[in-house]
Image (spheres, rainbow, N blue to C red):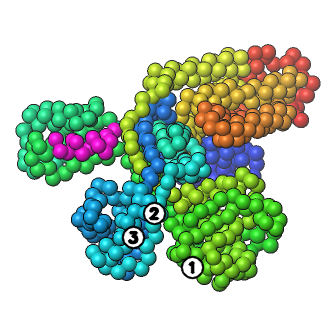
Amino acid sequence: MPFWSIMGKIFSILWSPSARGRSIRLSVFIVLIAALGISALSWKSVNLNIPGIGDLDRGGTGPLGLKLGLDLRGGGHLVYQADTGTRFDVTFLDPISAAEVIVALQDMRFGEEELALVDFTVEARSPFRMRIRAPILDSEDPRRSEFEETLTRRLGGITDLQIDTIDAPTVAQMEGALSIINRRVNLFGTEEPIIQLFGEDRIIVQLPGASGSNSEIRFSEPAPDVEHLEKLAAILTGAGFDDVEVRRRDEQAFRVSSATVGADTRVLALSALVEEFGLITQFEITSAIDDAKNLIGQTAQLEFKDRTCNGGVDQISGICLEPSDADIGLSGDDLSSAFVTTDSITGAWAVSVRFNSRGSDIFSDLTRRIVDRNERRIAIFLDDDLLIDVVARAWIRNGQSQITGNFSRERARTIAIQLESGRLPVPLTLIQENDVDALLGSESLRNSLIAGLVGLGLVMAFMIAYYRMAGVVASVSLIFYSILVLAAFKLIPITLTLSHIGGFILSIGMAVDANVLIFERMKEEMRIGRTLASSMEVGFNRAWPAIRDGNFSTLITCGVLLWFGDRLGGGLVTGFAISLGIGVIGSMFTAVIVSRNLLQLMAWIGLGHRINLFTPEGAPKTASNPGGGT
């Protein structure tokens, strides 16, 4: 038969409107999903650039490239402390760099006293604006009044100077900082970090898998192999490096693997290396936790923007359609305070905001232009995410206003905390960094994997022994289910803790439960003489309500567990609910689609007449419905 005739016949079967054609198309779809799942699990890391979607970068250190949690893998341990002191926000007439400010501060004197550079930090907020932090200077300290004059003399004209003294943080301020950190490191709720308050002014952050450092060291002169390898390891160990492993890259460069290295240890190590070996041209340390540190250490960006609803406003929901936002230069730096209050007219919950002098001028100009225009809004963004957009109901001249809406007390409190944390009156300083060991260790992981494999094997053996070919179908479906769920864990991605693994193992038993319901219904139909295809259709239709109700009940339970776990900080509860929910969804797909389709294929290849292959009871002695109709 010619090639094109064969291809035409295959194409006609694939796109046939008959039940057989639909089954073949469904089989191709199932094989494609299985191939994608196997591909995702075959490599430790998955890096794809999908046009229109972006980069897909997944992978971890666990089996099959899965990400493991603190209890199984360990990770990084960070401690942040609220940084108090006096803050100077300076706007210069001309562009200036942080380096110029630092140089000017080195010899700066306040009256007869000198404030050393070590007591200052300088942060560039824009080419014209600098933020300078110093120890607490009370209102009577003459150095506060002399600050502007000294900077003007050394660095040129100043157009604006804001001085704030940051006292000990309040509980609400620390809760706001905690909320920001959690949102940054756990954006999708699947990373399973441990983030909690410690005392009145500290925050502990533990991140799974974020441990270990790599150091790149390059000497100015070539070095002998043995001597420098041994000396290098000894010096780094003496400076505070742990678990040091030195590898030579070339005649002058070395790569050092170690446990996570803190900032103080880096300084000691560099000084010791320079003293022993002389000039070092490269000393760079990177760690798995560096990205998280950079993210946590940045100031939360709270921005107020002028929003225009180009597509108008939805009349029912009031949502702004096709919005475009214009920057007006109003940020969290200009917000003095935000707190929960009640509307004096309606008594409803509201959020009161107050701006400083610079912010009051900008806010006054904005509200004057957009007052009572529903298609113009004040959009408030926190870390580039829209927090809320509101309509200006009055021209606010004094920088004090209220944000109103159908707020509950909790919602108003949440918005106030987010605004306060965006303003960050409590900057955080990293005071401790080290590794945290796995709470349970590799032995627990190995035992969990063995338990899962044994459980899966026993279930498959029972199904094959009791249901025969139908049991083979259930076993193939379970393998497909396992691939599907593990691939989902990797691609979402989900950081697996022991609670996740427990939920997954439990869902294996639930995955086969739907098959049991279908097979038992099939046996009842085959007893009265129906064919395999007819028994399968009737059995599935009768089993489906029980499958649907049972799985949806479990999903409702997972939702309740997620709700309580999220609000009560129950990481174990949340992890169990997430993995069980994904497992239930996967089991419904395999039972409804995969198992049913495999049974149809078996009926069509001629196995449907051999009833004894599908039930230990054998074929019925009498056939009340030989034609196999429904």
Crowd tier of the residue under label 2, counting other residues whose Cα lies within 10 Å: few below 14, some 14–19, many 20 or above? few
Tag 1, which secondary structure?
A: helix
Q: What amino acid type is highlighted by mark number 2? A: Ser
Q: Residue lying farthest right?
A: 624
Tag 2, which secondary structure?
A: loop
Query: Badge 3 is on which residue?
Result: 145
Q: Is residue 478 above or below residue 589?
A: above
Identified at 46% across, 70% down, the residue is 162
**Label 1 or label 3, whichever comes before in sequence order:** 3
* Bounds of the magenta segment: 260-272
Query: Badge 1 is on which residue?
Result: 361
Magenta stretch: includes residue 43 = no
Image quadrant for the C terminus?
top right
Given residues 49 and 216, the one toward you in this image is: 216
Q: What amino acid type is highlighted by mark number 1? A: Asp
Identified at 66% across, 54% down, the residue is 414
Count of numbered tags:
3
Relative to 41, is 368 on the left or the right? Answer: right
Which of the two discs, 1 and 3, sits closer to the camera? 3
